[in-house]
Image: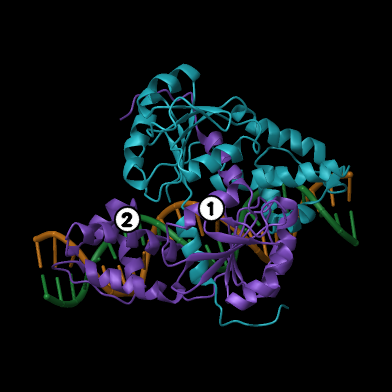
Chain colours: A cyan, B purple, C orange, D green
Amino acid sequence: MTEQIQGEIPVRTVERLVQYRRLLDDLSARKVEYVHSQEIAELAHNSAAQVRRDLMALGYTGSPARGYAVQELIARIGGLFDKTRDRKVALVGLGKLGHALLSFFALRPAHLRIVAAFDNDPEKINREVGGCMCHPVARMPEIIAREGITVGIIAVPAPAAQQVADLMVLAGIRGFLNFAPVPLKVPRYAFIDNVDIAMKLEKVAFFAEPAGEKTPC
Amino acid sequence: MTEQIQGEIPVRTVERLVQYRRLLDDLSARKVEYVHSQEIAELAHNSAAQVRRDLMALGYTGSPARGYAVQELIARIGGLFDKTRDRKVALVGLGKLGHALLSFFALRPAHLRIVAAFDNDPEKINREVGGCMCHPVARMPEIIAREGITVGIIAVPAPAAQQVADLMVLAGIRGFLNFAPVPLKVPRYAFIDNVDIAMKLEKVAFFAEPAGEKTPC
DNA sequence: TAGTGTGAAATAGTTCACAGCC
DNA sequence: GGCTGTGAACTATTTCACACTA
């Protein structure tokens, strides 16, 4: 919907590869050496054909007899994401959500670090929040440029989101993760993905049929 | 991917309708009475044909001359989501993310209330967190059944997620919003949607091309 | 005459099916 | 014999195009 592709690998495939990597790390920890598309498919809840397609996108080819070498696959996927290794991330908006994201991302994808946070609340400015200095939004262009940040997380209220996004584009951000519940306009060469949590919850509530008081299969 | 449809309205359409409702509320606040598909399309960043299709799903038909009546549309979309009005929500997992979600949802979709939170951390049990009592996971079935909760948010670490989901299904939850980075298995009659924030960030980083230091259009 | 409703075309994405290999 | 790689079929979703209406 709001995702402009620019690589040759489809967005969906990349999503699944991230997922596969987790599964493979898990298998690797359990000393599994080879794995078949079927097994990955079951773990990831999709079809074996899909898995094969996705893995083919890596240019890695498995052997019919033993399947795919776990270590090799991890290396391939790691190689693909290697270019994201030194990407720095900026977070704008230190409300409840921004706060949570900050502490959340402090741990999870180890190779992506939030190196700067921005907010306009005087209470927060120039104080360290979750291991990260909070700067005023006005200093954003300067700091983003200096640090060479290319990825930005938008966690500001909806009315401010577009303005913030524009600033970030100008400052050099090329990838956006937008938590504000509005669609943002960014240039074609930037990539944006939206996470609309409130919408997701409404959707889930909508499709949750309480009538169906069936017993589990 | 992990979304099992059971209504007659496509999932994507529901997502967009939630979005449209926000836009319409906005227009309504600005005393706009009629709106054309074109205008909604521009605000929502998609095509006019798409908007017309989506609105047709409501069974509401606009007039060529004036377009769609804003109030009427709001009423229709409201009517569609009316069945979600009294849905109660349970949150499992009061880590950083769970905490943020709790305070986030305390405000946002006013008609969906988190009425119970669960965690196994003795530090949190039986204390009020963000206006909501935190109970031990063991009491989940009892409380969910008593309160008639049908929607659940899973914000526990990945290894515990499936187990928690199973418990919730047994307790009567029929809609899941899963923040754990693992695909969960739920019965066909339950609806599940995943929000994998870490994956999203990796994706954005992957597609953010710092090379493209082009000037904005 | 601009804008709607909708069939038809186009496109994207997923699954099927089978040749080839180990 | 079972599994991979891949063209072909299929499905879902979006866009196009145009008759129709206020």
Corner quadrant of residue A24 = top right
Residue A89 or A191: which is nearer the viewer?
A89
Subunit of mark 1?
B
- Residue C14 location (% of width, % of height): 61, 59
Residue at figure coordinates x 29%, y 73% from the top left: B75
What type is the residue that disc 2 sits on? Ser
Q: Residue furthest top?
A: A146
Q: CA distance from mark 1 to mark 2?
A: 32 Å
Left or right of A48? Residue B39 is left
Numbered label attached to residue B47: 2
What type is the residue that disc 1 sits on? Leu
Left or right of B117? Residue A193 is left
Corner quadrant of residue B201 = top right
- Mark 1 residue crowding within 10 angstroms, few (<14) / some (14–19) / many (20+): many
> Residue under circle 1?
B101
- Residue A123 location (% of width, % of height): 42, 33
Residue D21 or A64: which is nearer the viewer?
D21
Residue at figure coordinates x 71%, y 50% from the top left: A52
